[in-house]
Image (tube, grey):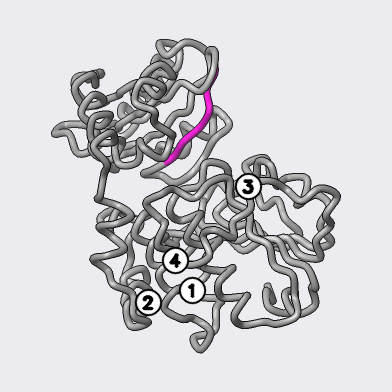
Amino acid sequence: MELFQLVNEAKTIAIAGHVRPDGDCVGSCLGLYNYLTEAVAGKQIDVYLETVPAAFSFLKNKEQALKEAKKEKTYDLFIALDCGSRDRLGFTEELFLSAKHTVNIDHHISNTMFAEYNHVEGDSSSTCEVLCGFLEDSGIGKETAECLYLGIVHDTGVFKHSNTSRKTMDTAGYLLEKGVSASQVIDDSFYRKTYMQNQILGRCLLESILMLDGKIIFSYVSQKMMQLYGAVPADLDGIIDQLRVTEGVEVAILVREEGVREHKVSMRSNGKVDVSKICCLFGGGGHKMASGCMMNGSVHDVINNLSGQIEHQLKEYTE
């Protein structure tokens, strides 16, 4: 795919990520936005993000992220980043549909190849890692590098997940040479928590439940709990990973109530279970070790359905 041929031919460009953007989504969108606004002139470039978590406040041009679609706007080029399917674009889906040309750059193996031009590297750690293969070295400044490094850090769990490869480490090292402060990006965006976030983490750990002889651990966050702490979804970052490292656990599940009988599910695996297969069954997707989906029903329905699928895979693994 000749991305920059499309960029050069376009006068108006939209960049957007998925709903409830995480570190890789924000990092790739702002990273590409920073790169293009510095590398090409005479073009209108808009970046759309549903939200930018406060922990990412040090990223350049975060304030340029638009939270509402420009009405009746038709872009020459729409670039979707870190988005596994068209419906995950959320409020920018209509802009995608009306654009003259569309590009999909991602790393999720469950990607539905929904654009005119699709570039998906399922063996890459993150969309930010994929993007580094597109961008010219001379055009990557420190601020762009910070965005890309943040995305890699978040999707690899600070380089400890199984999606971390030699290429990932080489790419991260390359970005460090651009002047990125690893300790600042990692501490400020990944580890640092507010008192309220620590309270929620503590409560989720305290109220977590073990199932299937300790092979499954799950915790539940209700709307009432979110309101009690004045929390937003981004405040739950890191909880699922803390659940995952519980001794003896093969799969960790965090269920968050979004509406009446509607739940957001996050799943993490320690290797024996492919959680992307399970999430795909319920309309979601992601990676073998980290995936998510939306599910309807009571929280008991959700856990029963997921645990059945997990138990089935664990039996196949031991046979």
Secondary structure of the residue carrying tag 1 is: helix
Q: Nearer the viewer, residue 108 or 81?
A: 81
Q: Nearer the viewer, residue 213 or 268?
A: 268
Q: Nearer the viewer, mark 1 or mark 3?
A: 3
The quarter in which the C terminus is drawn is: top left
Q: Nearer the viewer, mark 2 or mark 4?
A: 4
- Residue 132 disc label: 1
Which badge, 1 or 3, comes first in the chain's sequence? 3
Which badge, 3 or 2, comes first in the chain's sequence? 3
Secondary structure of the residue carrying tag 2 is: helix
Amino acid residing under circle 2: Leu
Q: Residues under labels 1 and 3: Cα distance?
A: 26 Å
Which badge, 2 or 4, comes first in the chain's sequence? 4
Secondary structure of the residue carrying tag 3 is: loop
Q: Residues within 10 Å of mark 3 (few under 14, many from 20)?
A: some
Amino acid residing under circle 4: Cys
Q: Quadrant of residue 196?
A: top left
Q: Residues under labels 3 and 2: Cα distance?
A: 28 Å
| Residue beneath disc 3 | 67
Left or right of residue 221: residue 48? right
| Residue beneath disc 4 | 147
On screen, 172 above or below 124?
below
- Is 229 magenta? The answer is no
Query: Residue placed farthest to the bottom in the image?
Result: 138
Q: Residues within 10 Å of mark 4 (few under 14, many from 20)?
A: many
Left or right of residue 107: residue 206? left
The residue at 32%/39% (across/down) is 269
Q: In the image, residue 104 lies at what x, y percent? A: 65, 59
Query: Residue placed farthest to the left in the image?
Result: 247
